Image (tube, rainbow, N blue to C red):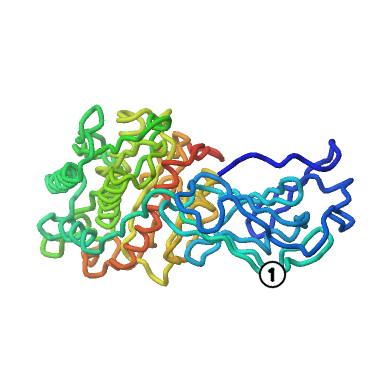
Amino acid sequence: MSRNRVSPRCPAGLAGRSRRALGISVSLALLAGCGDLLGSGGKDGAFRFESSDPPAGASGVSALEPVILSFSRNVDPASVAEGVSLQVEGRPLMVEYTLLGGDKVRLNPTDPLDFGTGHEVLLTGALRSVAGDPLSERASVAFTTEGRTLPAVSADSLLRHLEALAHDSMRGRGSGSGDELRAAEYLRERFVAYGLHSPAGGMIQDFSATSRRGDTLLFSRNVLAVLPGRGSLAEEWVVVGAHYDHIGFRDLADESQGPNNGADDNASGTAMVLEMARLFRAWVEAGGSALKPRRSILFAGWGAEEEGLLGSCHYVFEEPAVPLAHTRALLNFDMVGRLRDDVLVVSGGETSQVWYPMVQNANVSGLTLYRPTSSSPSGTDHACFWMAAIPWQGFFTRTHAEYHRPGDDTELINVPGMVRIGELALRVLARVVVMPEAPAFQGQAPG
């Protein structure tokens, strides 16, 4: 679609102003010194919708380009937010509106659209001309974006990972134990089977560190796999991670009471990362992103999180497998297996202004998104990335009575809920890797 602006029709030197309503930004200009403010608009007849770019019924529309709507008379900018909406599957998307020359409205999605997906622009009588006339009749413009739809998240695949990682035979994957190392090998085998690449230092990143209690030297490992990017964005990176360890038999009087299997904490997050790696690699190989420039992705299983975020902090401060200076975002999954009342906690929104609209637009399954006003600086593996001023998003379905107890078993996992979270997460990832400008860090990094 064209990005060309229509030449202004009003005298030069007019000041612009902006209006914000319902989270939608409407940039306004050319609103003084024009005959259209008196209602003439220089055109006769009813106020009507005339054309769009892309046209109605178009396919292969760029997921990165705006939509331009043309009208028979100049548009009242104050009515745009109520009278125009861009929707996908009946859900309005967050967009920015710009008036071009008075009689054209440019819709700029706040982040890339879903690939291979039908979208619709709806125009209602709430849209008015500057003379106050409502749109003469409702109109809609339907189009389909380029590429392929993202593949469906598999409940069976998620459950297989959960059952493998949270099985009694894994003995709770205690940080630094041989059981944790067996879980690490499970991740490595899956990444290899999914066709992912090794980073320069290999998929296994061994490290040693002192536990949070300061009394134990632990030997653990991170498991890292790469999906290379493409074109001008390939040297930039997005990290998708979860810790795969748990607490083993810690805090139990004897082994007969355990183990603490950690199905939610954090076999659920690990299963999510594995499923995202499988699906995203297959989607990219099938041309899902329409050969757009695309950032590289590092999928990570962090070791020894339960002993003080040791694996992720070792990665950030001691041995980053890809350059931190080129790492644009982190998506972190910790305890995403117990969705209740449809509430998903999405934290980290304060680290970049792009996150809130992006997660809202990706929420195809209608989850209730809870955004904390402030995030914990040390609660999980986002902490050290945050200290390094890397924008992050964290996904969490809240704590529960079985947290760090033997009752945290696979039978209590809400697998259909995980599927819905996975749908959202894949759409967020697809947006982050192709958006022309990476999320910009905002706020202050914690000490």
Relative to 174, is 437 on the left or the right?
right
Which quadrant is home to the N terminus? Answer: top right
Residue appearing at x 27%, y 37% in the figure: 226
Residue appearing at x 51%, y 43% in the figure: 351
**Quadrant of the image occupied by residue 136:** bottom right
Front residue of 25/90: it is 90
Q: x%, y% of residue 370?
A: 49, 61
How many marks do you count on the picture?
A: 1
Q: x%, y% of residue 275?
A: 26, 53
Residue that extends furthest to the front in the rendered view of this protein: 44
Front residue of 109/9: it is 9
**Quadrant of the image occupied by residue 409:** bottom left
Relative to 394, is 436 on the left or the right?
right
Relative to 182, is 199 on the left or the right?
right
Is the residue 173 above or below the residue 439 in the image?
below
Q: x%, y% of residue 90?
A: 51, 67
Residue that extends furthest to the bottom in the rendered view of this protein: 341
Q: x%, y% of residue 232?
A: 42, 30
Kind of residue sitting beneath label 1: Glu
Find numbered disc 1 in the image and state the secondary structure of the residue it sits on.
loop
Residue appearing at x 26%, y 69% in the figure: 412
Mark 1 surroundings: few (<14), some (14-19) or many (≥20) residues within 10 A:
few
Is the residue 359 above or below the residue 343 in the image?
above
Instruction: Identify residue for label 1.
Output: 137
Front residue of 198/11: it is 11
Is the residue 356 above or below the residue 365 in the image?
above
